[in-house]
Every structure is written in structure tokens, then in C-alpha cells.
Amino acid sequence: MPTRRTFAASLLAAPAAFAQSPSPRPAGLPKLTITGAKVLTTSGGSNYRWIFLKLLTSEPGLYGIGSASNHYQTHAVIAALQHHLIPWLIGKDASQIEDLWQSSHLRTYWRNGPVNNNVLSALDMALWDIKGKRANMPVFDLLGGKVRDAVPCYDHTGGRDAAEASDNVLKSQASGYRHIRVQFGGYGGGGFIPAGQGSRATGGFSGPAFDEELYVDQVPKMFEQIRAKVGFAPKLCHDVHSHLTGMNAAEFSRRMQPLQMFFVEDVLPPEQLAWYRELRKLSTTPQAVGELFTHPFEYMPFLAERLIDFARCRVSSIGGITPAKKVAVMCEINGCKTAFQEGGENDPINQLAAYHVDMSSPGFGIQEENHFPPFVHELLPGTATLRAGYLYGANTPGLGIDINESLAEKHPLKPIQGGGVYRLDRALDGSVVKP
Ligand code: MG
């Protein structure tokens, strides 16, 4: 039994004991400086408008790549990278991801917004890629290690009517998907008055016209027919694409409740999120929200009050892996889930950034599928593969993907006709419907 005196003496002796330790704490890796950066753009051999940032470092051969793709503001992002980010970035310490994210976020004083966030995203993903390569680990290992074997994805399908959609759901299920999103004639499909029909203003809009009440009436009936045909095993989703307002969104959710949806997405536009407080009282249909969000803070009230079930942001639109991981943690804490957005115009680097967050996050719910033609796998070696409803990354150090720069140069961006606008639906009187 040590006396107080001998115990005190042993404390005094402690520094000497540490000094003689046979395995001292490693001194860490040498400082890593960002020495150069390149903006790489490509059509991907198709009509993509992909923008990538390649960061070079003071360690020979060590570089990272990140996604800044923006289909609608492509050249604004390229200019922001070339003229504003890169001159500021050269010479900075590549190991300080969080500090570079924070200082780059505040660097523009007016922060957030999709162009700024695409710039941040490219920087952030490239820094995680560098750190992973340096550590000889996939990025998900740096985020805490994998908590699942691969990333479940939901398929995209649909049809012109319930019969065609049901057949396509069964095909998707047979190919291995458990989660299937069903649309009728595209995003916001259903609820359209055919071109030239209905009561219209003389000489005005004559195209297919969206009608909220028609949508609320038609779409649940189509899902009833689909459920009658395919049963309740497939986990079905549907994207309303912000086309409804107020109590129509609540009524739609209420009518979808017996159909046991995995989720309905964006029943309301981002300008009208307060309605979720009312909607929640009227229906248990799970709600996926936030495709157009640009900062994790936007989720805070909705996650803290449990007003939504799935956080739906695109990783590159919210500023990269660093903020996406924070969204995933907020989801976990509040009992909600992630459902990171993809979209057909998105690129394989952003898809992998989402993959690494998904792989390491207990707050994960589902990932949107995106698949690429064989040429893209050649252009970007390491592009993730989709097999039977699961996404698999290469799981090599870093993000696990590279760019064949000479091949990208042979497939430059194509001229953007009309400035690159998102297609808008219109109502019978010619007014635009929120997308
Ligand atoms: Mg959507």
C-alpha cells in the first residue's frame, strides 16, 4: 500500500518515466503546402458540364481532386475558381481542411449560395482526397471508418400511366433494387392538363399545364394501382419537385399515407418550409426535404423539431464532405436520415464524396442512384459502380478516383445554348410553377 509520501514521489518521477518511453508520440507528418491548382472541365463525352479542381502539393506526386460541377451556372463557377479561389489558396497548408473550409466560406464575406458552395466543395473534396492518399486510407476511414458494407441506392423509374409504372417497378425490383422512385412522365409528372386543352387565355401558353388540385387527385390514385399490382415490398418514393403549396401539400401527404411510401420528396418549395409544421400534424408520410438547401444550418430547425425524415442535399451544393458529414451527424442526433441527391447531370467525384459520408454515417438513410456510360469510367478511373441496388467505391486511398486529363481535353465543354436554364413548368394561365 503506497503512503501519501511514496505516491507523491512517484508523481514527481513521472516526467522522467515519459522521457524514457520506448515508443514516443509520433512527431506527425511534415507540413504540406498547396503549390498549384488546375480547373479541369469536360463534357464527359456527352452533354455533361463537369468542373473539377485538381490541387497540387509540395509532396511530389501527391494531388487531390474535387467536384465543382454546376449545370446552370457553369462558367460562373469556373471564373470563381480561377480568379478568386486559386490565387487565395496557393501556399496554404493542405492538412487544415476545417480551417480552409471555414476561411474559404467567409473569404467572400457574403456566403452560401450554389456558386460559392461549388467552389468550396471542390476545395474540400480535393483536400480530403489528399489527406486520404497521404494516410493511405479511403476517406471513409478518416471519417470514422465504415459502418455498412456498401451504399444502398434508390432506382429511378416510372411510366406514362400506373400500368406501365407497375411493370417498371417490378423490373427494377427484379434487378435488385429495394428502393424505387416512381414518376409519371418526369419530375412533377401527373397533374398536367394536356397541351392545348383546358380554359386558357387567348394567344397565351398552350403547353402541358400543371394543376395542383388535379395532381393531388391523380397521383395517389396511380400509386393505389401500383400497390395493387406490386404489393408493399418495394420501398417506393415520389418527387413532387416543389410543385404544391400549403394545404395541398398536406392533403397530398395525407392521401399518400395508406400507400406506405418510403418518402415523398419536396412536396413544398424551399420558400414555404414553415408549412411542414402543419403538414406533420396531418400525416405520417415520411418527408424528404432540402435538395435546394445550401448550408447545414438550414436543416437545424427542421431536424431539431423532427419536421422532416430525410435530408436531401447534394454534397457539392452544400460545400463538400465537411458540411455533408455535419448534416449526417445532425440527422443521427435527431433520429432523421440522409438521402443525398444525385441527378443525371451530376459527376462521379461528387457521387463518391457522398459515398464516403454514407459509408461512415449511422445517420444514413438512402442515396439517389446515378450511373454513367462506360466512357466515363475510362475518363474518371475509379468511378463507383452500381450493382443490384448498391453503390461500390474502389475503396483505394483518398476518394478513390482519378481524371484522365488528356481524355478530358479531347472532350471539352460544349457551348451552352440559351445560357443553360432549368426547364420550368407552367400553369394554365401561363404562370411559372416552382421547380
Ligand atoms: Mg428532387
Image (cartoon, rainbow, N blue to C red):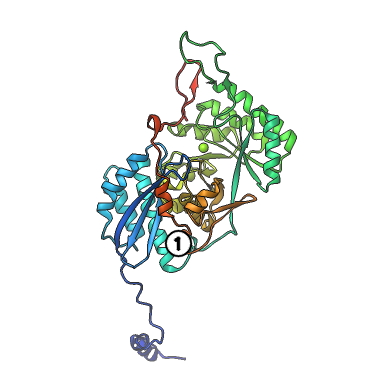
Whether residue 19 sits left or right of residue 162 in the image: it is left
- Say which quarter of the image contains residue 130: bottom left
- Say if 72 sits above or below 66 in the image: above
CB at disc 1 and ligand 1 closer than 8 Å: no
Residue of label 1: 398
Q: Residue furthest front?
A: 410
- Say if 108 sits above or below 201 in the image: below
Q: Residue at x 63, y 32 (%)?
A: 256
Q: Residue at x 69, y 44 (%)?
A: 173
Q: Position of residue 269 (x, y in %)?
A: 47, 32
Per the image, label 1 sits on a secondary structure element best described as loop
Whether residue 223 sits left or right of residue 299 in the image: it is right
- Say if 205 sits above or below 275 in the image: above
Q: Position of residue 10 (x, y in %)?
A: 38, 89
> Does the rendering let one see residue 322?
no
> Does the rendering let one see residue 221?
yes
Whether residue 372 sits left or right of residue 9 in the image: it is right
Q: Position of residue 263 (x, y in %)?
A: 59, 39
Q: Residues within 10 Å of mark 1 (few under 14, many from 20)?
A: many
